[in-house]
Image (cartoon, rainbow, N blue to C red):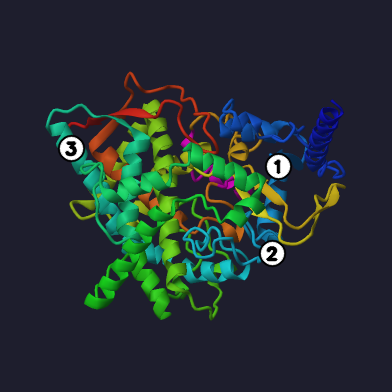
C-alpha cells in the first residue's frame, strides 16, 4: 500500500513538473512591453486550427484584430512565442531596412549552422526557400537573372502553349456536347502542373487529357499536406524539433523526391549529349553550372509585369564565387514545382470564383481581351502586349489582395534585435525568435482597403493605385526575401485568363457556393466545398 502511494506521488510530481515546465514556456512574452493573445495550455494560440474549428485566414484576422491599436503583438504557436507586426512602417523596417537581422525563414529543424537545414542532402533543405545566411544570398543572386522580364519573354511561349492546350481541351469537350462544370482547384492544379513540367522539368504533359499521368500523380501525392502522417510530422517538428532531428525524419516522401530528382538529372544528361537548347529552367541551371547566367544592365529595375510584381533587391544583383553542386541546382527546380503547383492554382481558383460571382467585372475584362485580340489582327499574343492590358492587371492585383495564396510570411531573428516603434515601445527580440507578417489580415484591414470583402479592381486603377501603401500590399512578400518568381506567376495567371475568357464565359451552377466559405483545414487557403464553375462557350468563337 505504501509503495503504491509512493508511486502515485511520484507520478503526480512528474506530471506537475511537466505542467510547470510547459506553463513556463508561455511566460516568454510576459516581460515584453507588448500585449499577448492569451495562450491555451500547450496549444498556445493554435488550438482552433489544430482542432479545425476555424479556417486559417479567419484565425490570422482574429489574432491581428485582438489588439487593434498596437503596432506589435505576441502570440504562441503551440509552445513557441511569435511576434506579429501590425503596422506597415514596422513591417517595412523588419523586412527591408533591418533585413540583416531577419534574413531567414524559420528553420523546421536547425543543426546550429545558420547556412544549413538538417537533412542537408534533401531537395527541400537545399531549395532557395530553406537556405539560410550567406548561402541563401549566394543562391538568390545566382537565380535572380533567371526571373527577369527578359527571361520571361523567352519562356512566354512555353506557358502560352499550356494555356492554349487547356482551352483546346475545353473546346473539344464543348463541341462534343459535354457540359463543362468543373472544380477550379483541380482544373488549375492540372494547368499549373503542366506549366511547371515544361518550364522547370523540360517535359510536356497534358493533365486534362491524361488525368492520371505519372508526373501529376506523383506531384499530388508529394504535396498532400492534409494526410494524417504529414500533419503528425509537422506537429512534432514544431513542438520537438530536436527529436525529429535526431531521428532524421523529413516531411516529404524520399521516394517521390527521388523520382523528381532523377527526372531532372536524366534531362540534363540528354541535353549535354545532344546539345539541346530549350528556354526553360533546366537550361538556365545548366548556364549557372557553366557560369554564364548573369544580370544584364537593361534588365534591372523593370516593373514590367504589373502592380503586384516585386523588384529584386541589391542582394539578388551581387556577385559571388560559390560553386554549386548538382544536387543544390536540382533542388531549385524542385522548389519551382512546390511553388508553382499550388500557389498559382490557388490564385486562379479564387480569381475564377470572383469573376463568376461578378459578371460585370468579367464582361469588362472580356471586352479588353476582345480589343487586344483585334489589335493583334491575327498575329500571336506576346509578352509585351499582355503586360499592356491595364484592366487585366487591375483584376489580378485585386484578386491577390483579397485572396493572397501565401496568407502570411515569416522572418527568423538571426541575432538579438532592439525593437523600437518610435512611440515609446522598446525591447529586445532575442535571436532565434520568429516574426509572422499577417498578409491576409493586412489585406483585409479596412484602414488600408475600405470595404475589404468587396472585390473591386478599381482599387488598382491608375487613379487609385498611388493611394496604396506598398507595405500593405504583400502577395509576394516583402523585402529581399520576397518571392523570386512573381513575374512567372503573374504571366501564368494572365495568360490563362486571356485565352480562357476569349473563348468562354464563367457561369455559376447549382454547385457554385456564393458567398464562398473557406475550409477549416490547416494553414491553407481552400474553399469549403471547392469552387465549381460552368465553362460556357462564347458565341462567335
Q: Is residue 77 visible?
A: yes
Which residue matches tag 1? Answer: 86
Return the residue found at the far top.
510
Q: Is residue 271 left or right of residue 44?
A: left
Cα separation, mark 2 vs mark 3, equals 52 Å
Give the mark nearer the N terminus: 2 vs 3: 2
Which residue matches tag 2? Answer: 100
Q: Is residue 333 magenta?
A: no
Describe the element under mark 1 as helix, strand or loop.
loop
Describe the element under mark 2 as helix, strand or loop.
helix
Give the mark nearer the N terminus: 3 vs 1: 1
Residues drawn in magenta: 456-474
Q: Is residue 110 left or right of residue 233?
A: right
Image quarter where the C terminus lies is top left
Q: Is residue 457 magenta?
A: yes
- The disc placed on residue 171 is 3
Amino acid at each position: 500500500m505504501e509503495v503504491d502511494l509512493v508511486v502515485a506521488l511520484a507520478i503526480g510530481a512528474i506530471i506537475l513538473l511537466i505542467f510547470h515546465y510547459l506553463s513556463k514556456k508561455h511566460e516568454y512574452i510576459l516581460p515584453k512591453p507588448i500585449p499577448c493573445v492569451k495562450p491555451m495550455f500547450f496549444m498556445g494560440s493554435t488550438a482552433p486550427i489544430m482542432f479545425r474549428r476555424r479556417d486559417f485566414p479567419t484565425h490570422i484576422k482574429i489574432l491581428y484584430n485582438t489588439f487593434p491599436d498596437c503596432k506589435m503583438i505576441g502570440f504562441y504557436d503551440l509552445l513557441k512565442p511569435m511576434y506579429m507586426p501590425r503596422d506597415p512602417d514596422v513591417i517595412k523596417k523588419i523586412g527591408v531596412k533591418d533585413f540583416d537581422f531577419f534574413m531567414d525563414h524559420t528553420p523546421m529543424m536547425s543543426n546550429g549552422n545558420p547556412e544549413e537545414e538538417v537533412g542537408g542532402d534533401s531537395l527541400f533543405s537545399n531549395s532557395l526557400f530553406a537556405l539560410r545566411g550567406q548561402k541563401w544570398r549566394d543562391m538568390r543572386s545566382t537565380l535572380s537573372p533567371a526571373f527577369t522580364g527578359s527571361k520571361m519573354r523567352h519562356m512566354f511561349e512555353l506557358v502560352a502553349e499550356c494555356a492554349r492546350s487547356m482551352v483546346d481541351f475545353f473546346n473539344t469537350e464543348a463541341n462534343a456536347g459535354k457540359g463543362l462544370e468543373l472544380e477550379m482547384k483541380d482544373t488549375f492544379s492540372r494547368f499549373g502542373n503542366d506549366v511547371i513540367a515544361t518550364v522547370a522539368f523540360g517535359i510536356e504533359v497534358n493533365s486534362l487529357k491524361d488525368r492520371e499521368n505519372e508526373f501529376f500523380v506523383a506531384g499530388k501525392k508529394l504535396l498532400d499536406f492534409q494526410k494524417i502522417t504529414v500533419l503528425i510530422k509537422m506537429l512534432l517538428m514544431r513542438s520537438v524539433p530536436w527529436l525529429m532531428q535526431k531521428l532524421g525524419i523529413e516531411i516529404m516522401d524520399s521516394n517521390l523526391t527521388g523520382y523528381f530528382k532523377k527526372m531532372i538529372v536524366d534531362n540534363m544528361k540528354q541535353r549535354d549529349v545532344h546539345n539541346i537548347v530549350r528556354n526553360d529552367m533546366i537550361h538556365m541551371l545548366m548556364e549557372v553550372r557553366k557560369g554564364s547566367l548573369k544580370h544584364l544592365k537593361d534588365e534591372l529595375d523593370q516593373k514590367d509585369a504589373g502592380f503586384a510584381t516585386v523588384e529584386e533587391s541589391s542582394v539578388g544583383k551581387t556577385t559571388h564565387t560559390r560553386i554549386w553542386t548538382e544536387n543544390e541546382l536540382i533542388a531549385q527546380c524542385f522548389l519551382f514545382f512546390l511553388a508553382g503547383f499550388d500557389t498559382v492554382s490557388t490564385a486562379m481558383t479564387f480569381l475564377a470564383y470572383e469573376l463568376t460571382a461578378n459578371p460585370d467585372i468579367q464582361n469588362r475584362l472580356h471586352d479588353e481581351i476582345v480589343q487586344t485580340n483585334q489589335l493583334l489582327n491575327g498575329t500571336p499574343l506576346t509578352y509585351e502586349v499582355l503586360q499592356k492590358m491595364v484592366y487585366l492587371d487591375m483584376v489580378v492585383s485585386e484578386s491577390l489582395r483579397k485572396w493572397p495564396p501565401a496568407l502570411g510570411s515569416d522572418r527568423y531573428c538571426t541575432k538579438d534585435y532592439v525593437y523600437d516603434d518610435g512611440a515609446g515601445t522598446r525591447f529586445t527580440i532575442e535571436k532565434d525568435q520568429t516574426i509572422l507578417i499577417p498578409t491576409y489580415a493586412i489585406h483585409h484591414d479596412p484602414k488600408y482597403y475600405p470595404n475589404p470583402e468587396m472585390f473591386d479592381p478599381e482599387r488598382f486603377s491608375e487613379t487609385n493605385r498611388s493611394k496604396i501603401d506598398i507595405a500593405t500590399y504583400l502577395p509576394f512578400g516583402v523585402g529581399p526575401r520576397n518571392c523570386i518568381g512573381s513575374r512567372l506567376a503573374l504571366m501564368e495567371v494572365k495568360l490563362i485568363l486571356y485565352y480562357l475568357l476569349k473563348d468562354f464565359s464563367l457561369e455559376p451552377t447549382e454547385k457554385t457556393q456564393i458567398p464562398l466559405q473557406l475550409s477549416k483545414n490547416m494553414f491553407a487557403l481552400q474553399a469549403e466545398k471547392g469552387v465549381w464553375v460552368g465553362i460556357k462557350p462564347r458565341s462567335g468563337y
